[in-house]
């Protein structure tokens, strides 16, 4: 297996981009990644998209986006794993380069969500859950994470204030990210007093509805050393895992087993432990998700995730492991298929020392964790620079 | 869109709580499956789930999906039935602030939603305080 490097990253400003089309936001991010890499060709591409069919009535997006990038006739494949579509696409790109099948691979993620009404969007997102045995009964995604939140509160005494501190922290990071959808700070009181969505979660516990795209360029490390003018960032660990599609089928509702399983494999492949991770981008689709993920990744003991966030152990430049320096899904936005790719963009910029105001000093090893549904799928990547 | 065919296929589970019990290890799956996730056994007998259980966790949905637009706020929980099977179900006939983790409940057959402009009625299980 060949070593794989990220030699280009690209993003655009995320938000409610009503004047821009699905294909346009993708091509903008992809061109930024191509320019950042300084490559004059791409041999193959993968695109993470969850639900373009529902959101904009468009399937067959691999071909569409390769065409609009001027890349036809290269192979182009769409990858779907709900909210983990982007991470899963990165992993496919990694495998294609590592296996020696292609030299330069573009991995993009894109979602155009804001054309639909809130009710229609809620319904589209719910297709990531069990349609017949969860969604049929009227559950929503905030509802499913609310079920996890209630269980975490009962089991470990996690508080609403601790959950709110995750939102406060991610907005603090995000206010330094010019590409974030909501680049402003929020107070704990604002989170606690925002409108109720699914008890105990409120509006500011939830990631927003976003239009956005992100892209990266992968190539063998040997080639990267010849053509890249930037610090070489290697993907040294990649793993993916699944769990039951329905939350209710899990014996332990607060343990994200797919995340724990994927992390264990990724740590092993990278020859790292949780203590080696200096910066992480993880799937905070809801505040409680970040708490559960930091536990499943082994950053904290079980039940300690909320307390750790409240104590600032996941905040930038506080001596801990900063989590979601980009602002996370919460502040940066969550265009479903783009999220997993944007996580790799942020970690690459952190490891290159290009994260500007939100740079974690001296970060050399970073991790991304991208999760589908209530954790029925997870993709973890570990990146390193020399 | 919930088609009539898709609806009809789930009727044994939704109307009669039919589940599959693995003949090799005894694990019960709801809905029934073709292979046991625990022991890989492929032979099952049809059993009816218990209609008694308790609330494991719950939420109150205040921002509903389109098909439930007129129903909110409503409570949904994960309920563990006496045979150990867990299901997601609405908790009804109970004030929203009276619901507690551990609360005993009973399964009843109810209307779940009215689908589409034709207003087709869809039925299934909900739980009520026992
Ligand atoms: Zn069995």
Image (tube, coloured by chain):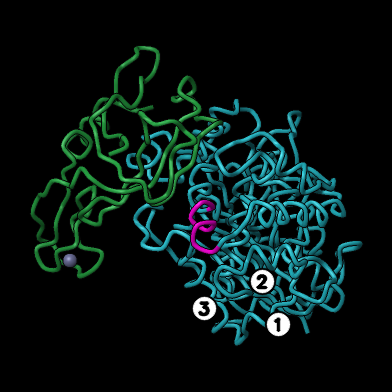
Chain colours: A cyan, B green
Residue drawn where x is 52% and y is 58% of the image:
A152
Badge 2 vs badge 3, beta-carbon distance below 8 Å? no
Q: Decide which of A168, B119 is in the foreground and name it.
A: A168
In the image: residue A154, left or right of residue B18: right
Q: Quadrant of the C terminus of chain A?
A: bottom right
Q: Residues within 10 Å of mark 2 (few under 14, many from 20)?
A: many
- The part of the chain drawn in magenta is A149-156
Q: Secondary structure at mark 2?
A: strand
Residue B20: give x, y in percent of width and height. 15, 52
Tell me how far mark 2 sits from mark 3, CA to CA. Answer: 12 Å
On whether residue A154 falls in the magenta region, the answer is: yes
In the image: residue A377, left or right of residue B23: right
Residue A151 vertical position relative to residue A125 in the rendered view, above or below: below
Pointer 3 residue? A264
Residue drawn where x is 40% and y is 43% of the image:
B77
Q: Secondary structure at mark 1?
A: helix
Pointer 2 residue? A367
Residue A108, by quadrant, is bottom right
Pointer 1 residue? A222
Using the image, name the chain to which the residue with label 1 belongs. A
Badge 1 vs badge 3, beta-carbon distance below 8 Å? no
Residue A70 vertical position relative to residue A289 in the rendered view, above or below: above
Residue A365, by quadrant, is bottom right
Do the residues at pointers 1 and 3 share their chain? Answer: yes
Q: Nearer the viewer, mark 1 or mark 2?
A: 2
In the image: residue B71, left or right of residue A248: right
Residue drawn where x is 77% and y is 44% of the image:
A189
Residue A209: give x, y in percent of width and height. 66, 38
């Amino acid at each position: 297996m060949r070593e794989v490097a990220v030699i280009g990253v690209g993003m655009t400003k995320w938000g409610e981009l009503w004047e821009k089309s699905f294909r346009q936001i993708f091509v903008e991010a992809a061109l930024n990644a191509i320019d950042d890499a300084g490559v004059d060709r791409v041999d193959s591409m993968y695109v993470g998209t969850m639900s373009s069919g529902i959101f904009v009535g468009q399937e067959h997006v691999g071909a569409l986006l390769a065409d609009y990038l001027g890349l036809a006739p290269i192979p182009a494949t769409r990858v779907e794993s709900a909210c983990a579509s982007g991470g899963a696409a990165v992993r496919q790109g990694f495998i294609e380069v590592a296996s020696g099948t292609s030299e330069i691979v573009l991995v993009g993620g894109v979602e155009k969500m804001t054309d639909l009404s809130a009710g229609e969007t809620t319904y589209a997102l719910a297709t990531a859950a069990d349609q017949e045995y969860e969604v049929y009964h009227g559950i929503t995604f905030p509802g499913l994470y609310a079920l996890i939140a209630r269980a975490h509160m009962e089991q470990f005494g996690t508080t609403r204030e601790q959950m709110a501190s995750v939102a406060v922290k991610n907005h603090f990071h995000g206010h330094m990210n010019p590409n974030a959808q909501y680049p402003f700070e929020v107070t704990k009181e604002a989170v606690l007093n925002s409108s109720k969505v699914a008890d105990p979660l409120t509006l500011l516990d939830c990631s927003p509805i976003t239009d956005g795209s992100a892209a990266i360029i992968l190539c063998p490390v040997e080639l990267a050393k010849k053509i890249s003018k930037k610090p070489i960032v290697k993907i040294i660990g990649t793993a993916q895992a699944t769990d039951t599609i329905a939350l209710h089928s899990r014996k332990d509702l607060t343990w994200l087993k797919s995340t724990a399983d994927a992390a264990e494999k990724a740590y092993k492949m990278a020859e790292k432990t949780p203590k080696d991770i200096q910066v992480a981008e993880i799937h905070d689709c809801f505040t409680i998700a970040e708490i559960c993920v930091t536990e499943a990744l082994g950053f904290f003991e079980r039940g300690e995730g909320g307390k750790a966030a409240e104590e600032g152990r996941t905040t930038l430049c506080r001596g801990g492991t900063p989590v979601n320096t980009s602002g996370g899904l919460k502040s940066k936005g969550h265009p479903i298929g783009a999220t997993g790719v944007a996580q790799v963009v942020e970690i690459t910029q952190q490891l290159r020392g290009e994260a500007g105001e939100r740079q974690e000093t001296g970060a050399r090893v970073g991790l991304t964790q991208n999760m589908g549904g209530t954790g029925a799928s997870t993709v973890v990547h570990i990146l390193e620079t020399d | 869109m919930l088609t009539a065919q898709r609806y009809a296929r789930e009727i044994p589970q939704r109307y009669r709580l039919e589940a599959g019990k693995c003949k090799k290890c005894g694990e019960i799956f709801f809905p029934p499956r073709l292979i046991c996730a625990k022991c890989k056994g492929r032979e099952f007998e049809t059993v009816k789930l218990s209609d008694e259980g308790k609330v494991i966790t719950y939420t109150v949905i205040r921002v509903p999906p389109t098909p439930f637009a007129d129903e909110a706020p409503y409570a949904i929980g994960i309920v563990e039935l006496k045979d150990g099977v867990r299901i997601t179900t609405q908790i009804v006939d109970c004030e929203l602030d009276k619901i507690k983790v551990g609360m005993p409940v009973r399964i009843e057959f109810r209307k779940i939603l009215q689908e589409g402009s034709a207003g087709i009625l869809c039925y299934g299980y909900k739980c009520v305080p026992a």
